[in-house]
Image (cartoon, grey):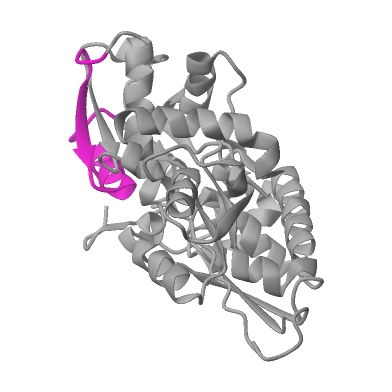
């Protein structure tokens, strides 16, 4: 592991078939994974005095995480031509940018955790959750391949990032479902990258980590001659908890009322383009990773490995209202303030 918080993912084996690529920094891997997922797309719309249907430039901002692979691919492949004359993609840096951008009106379409969308809607910020872009990114990673289920964690310790946020609350609910509350020691890390660094350093054995941090950790361990295992799929555990399919609608695209009023004819084009991009990304992870690697500032082998585990989708939020509300209720049971103090009404869903 390099210094200054850098996880160097370059292989030490010069004969490896994997092409050289850049290291993953603490900032690039961790940024945007806050608030449960924290992925943000900001679309500052220029030429505000033009006719309502005009959209000259669309700037997409997102974190180095699953949904942004879809975004970067859509931009690179020109799938957003019907949305704006010019489209760009830039990396999102801090969660505060999202709040400031939404407050100022400079961001009008934002990928955010569903819990955040519910919170902002309930607090009176005019927006709708348009779609879901990932059905869950959470996995338990361990140096012990003997762990295969939540039950196997009894008497053990696990490190969980984002204290009191969606990943920890979901994991706490899983422990309660299996009657293991208080019988598993839950340690906390501020971010996924901190948990990954502790795993790689051998300071901890097991951690709950989202993609693409999971794939980055496994890849780095392999290049260092060690092994990390993806031992528990939390999406499958979520399905067991609810007696339903493993659909954990973790994050999606929210559109402000202002955007929908100013550019009503572009909403369908935007959602259709993202649906097309999602299908392409899932169908050909290698091509998608190559398209998105530079924009996301992550090595393409890590992105390629992460795509099959990122559960990327593009489903209208109204069609997933039931699983979304299931997730919100689980979170609100322990922390109602995270969803704005009450369950959102039908007005949240586009």
Left/right placement of residue 149 relative to residue 161 reads right
Q: Quick one: 66 or 253, which is closer to the camera?
A: 253
Q: Is residue 189 magenta?
A: yes
Q: Nearer the viewer, residue 173 or 27?
A: 173
Residue nearer the viewer, 97 or 75: 97
Coordinates of residue 341 in the picture (x, y in percent): 36, 41
Q: Identify the residue shown where x is 48% and y is 46%.
A: 118
Residue 17 visible in rendering: no
Residue found 29% across the figure and 43% down from its top:
162
Is 77 left, or right, of 103 in this rendering? right
Q: Residue 132 falls in which quadrant of the image?
A: top right
Where, by quadrant of the figure, is residue 76 drawn?
A: bottom right
Residue 316 in view in this figure: yes
Residue at position x 65%, y 43% from top?
A: 317
Q: Is 26 located above or below residue 119 in the figure?
A: below
- Residue 142 at x, y = what percent? 34, 27
Residue 159 screen position, x and y as percent: 25, 33
Depicted 298 relative to depicted 233: above or below: below
Left or right: where 309 falls relative to 194:
right
Which stretch did the figure color magenta? 181-206
* Image spot of residue 330 (x, y percent): 41, 27
Taking the magenta stretch, the answer to whether it contains residue 268 is no
- Residue 5 falls in image quadrant: bottom left
Tell which of 199 and 160 is nearer to you. 160
Q: Residue at x 76, y 47 (%)?
A: 279
Q: How many marks?
A: 0
């Amino acid at each position: 592991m390099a210094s200054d918080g850098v996880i160097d993912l370059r292989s030490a084996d010069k004969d490896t078939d994997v092409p050289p690529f850049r290291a993953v920094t603490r900032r690039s891997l961790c940024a945007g994974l806050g608030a449960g997922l924290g992925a943000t797309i900001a679309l500052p719309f220029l030429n505000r005095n033009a006719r309502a249907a005009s959209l000259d430039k669309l700037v997409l901002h997102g974190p180095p995480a699953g949904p942004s692979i879809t975004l970067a691919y859509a931009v690179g492949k020109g799938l957003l031509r019907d949305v704006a004359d010019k489209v760009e993609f830039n990396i999102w840096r801090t969660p505060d940018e999202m709040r400031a951008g939404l407050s100022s009106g400079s961001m009008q379409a934002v990928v955010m955790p569903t819990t955040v969308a519910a919170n902002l809607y309930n607090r009176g910020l005019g927006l709708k959750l348009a779609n879901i872009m990932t059905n869950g990114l959470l996995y338990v990673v361990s140096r012990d391949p003997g762990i295969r289920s939540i039950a196997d964690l009894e008497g053990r310790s696990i490190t969980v990032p984002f204290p009191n946020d969606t990943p920890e609350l979901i994991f706490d609910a899983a422990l309660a479902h299996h009657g293991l509350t208080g019988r598993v020691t839950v340690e906390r890390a501020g971010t996924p990258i901190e948990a990954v660094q502790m795993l790689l350093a051998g300071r901890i054995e097991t951690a709950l980590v989202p993609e693409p941090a999971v794939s980055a950790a496994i890849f780095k361990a392999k290049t260092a001659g060690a092994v990390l295992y993806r031992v528990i799929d939390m999406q499958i555990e979520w399905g067991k908890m609810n007696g339903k399919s493993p659909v954990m609608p973790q994050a999606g695209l929210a559109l402000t009322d202002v955007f929908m009023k100013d550019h009503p004819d572009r909403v369908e084009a935007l959602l259709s383009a993202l649906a097309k991009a999602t299908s392409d990304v899932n169908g050909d992870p290698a091509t998608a990773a190559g398209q998105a690697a530079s924009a996301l500032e992550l090595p393409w082998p890590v992105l390629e490995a992460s795509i099959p585990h990122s559960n990327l989708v593009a489903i209208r939020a109204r069609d997933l209202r039931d699983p979304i509300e299931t997730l919100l209720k689980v979170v609100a049971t322990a922390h109602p303030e995270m969803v704005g103090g009450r369950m959102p009404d039908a007005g949240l869903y586009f």
